[in-house]
């Protein structure tokens, strides 16, 4: 038979496995947000250079194979062509 990977855990189950106290997560997220949003207008936006840097980071940690071509895994084809009010700004007002 074909190999089927197990389904990913649901977000609540995955969160329950974290060993970081919720208060620490809540205080750490505002500190990380500037790193995650540096140089982008909308949270989650990626450029080819940013994507390639992330792939290099993952490869250095053994999370992906060193032979993976990050350019082949990058596309903006599914993104909206116009900004959306539903998309959060990268740097929310204080």
Image (cartoon, grey):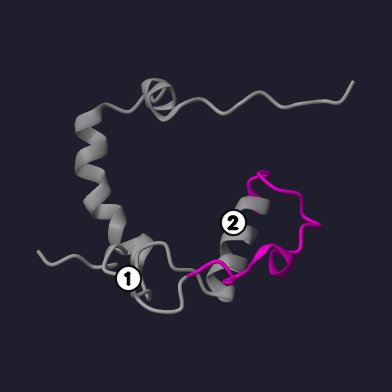
Q: Name the outermost residue toward the right.
A: 1
Residue 84: mark = 1
Where is mark 2, residue-wise?
Answer: 57
Q: Which residues are magenta?
A: 60-79
Q: Which residue is pictured at 46% across the width and 78% down the height? A: 81
Q: Position of residue 23 (x, y in %)?
A: 19, 32
Q: CA distance from mark 2 to mark 1?
A: 30 Å
Q: Which residue is pictured at 37% across the width and 60% down the height? A: 36
Between disc 2 and disc 1, the foreground one is: 1
Q: Earlier in the sequence, mark 2 or mark 1?
A: 2
Q: Quadrant of residue 8?
A: top right
Q: Position of residue 57 (x, y in %)?
A: 59, 56
Along the horizontal axis of the image, is 3 left or right of 37? right
Mark 2 burial class by Cα count in 10 Å: few <14, some 14-19, many 20+: few
Q: Nearer the viewer, residue 33 or 74?
A: 74
* Image: 76 above or below 22: below
Along the horizontal axis of the image, is 89 left or right of 19? left
Label 1 secondary element = loop
Q: Which residue is pictured at 69% across the width and 62% down the height? A: 73
Q: Which residue is pictured at 70% across the width and 70% down the height? A: 71
Q: Quadrant of residue 24?
A: top left
Q: Position of residue 90 (x, y in %)?
A: 29, 67
Mark 1 burial class by Cα count in 10 Å: few <14, some 14-19, many 20+: few
Q: Position of residue 12 (x, y in %)?
A: 37, 25
* Image: 80 above or below 66: below
* Image: 83 above or below 88: below
Label 2 secondary element = helix
């Amino acid at each position: 038979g074909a190999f089927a990977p197990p389904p990913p855990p649901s977000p609540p189950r995955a969160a329950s496995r974290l060993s970081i106290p919720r208060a620490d997560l809540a205080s750490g997220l505002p500190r990380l947000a500037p790193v995650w949003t540096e140089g982008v207008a909308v949270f989650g936006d990626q450029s080819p250079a940013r994507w390639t840097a992330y792939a290099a980071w993952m490869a250095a940690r053994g999370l992906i194979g060193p032979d993976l071509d990050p350019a082949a895994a990058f596309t903006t084809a599914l993104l909206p062509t116009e900004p959306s009010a539903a998309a959060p700004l990268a740097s929310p007002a204080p």
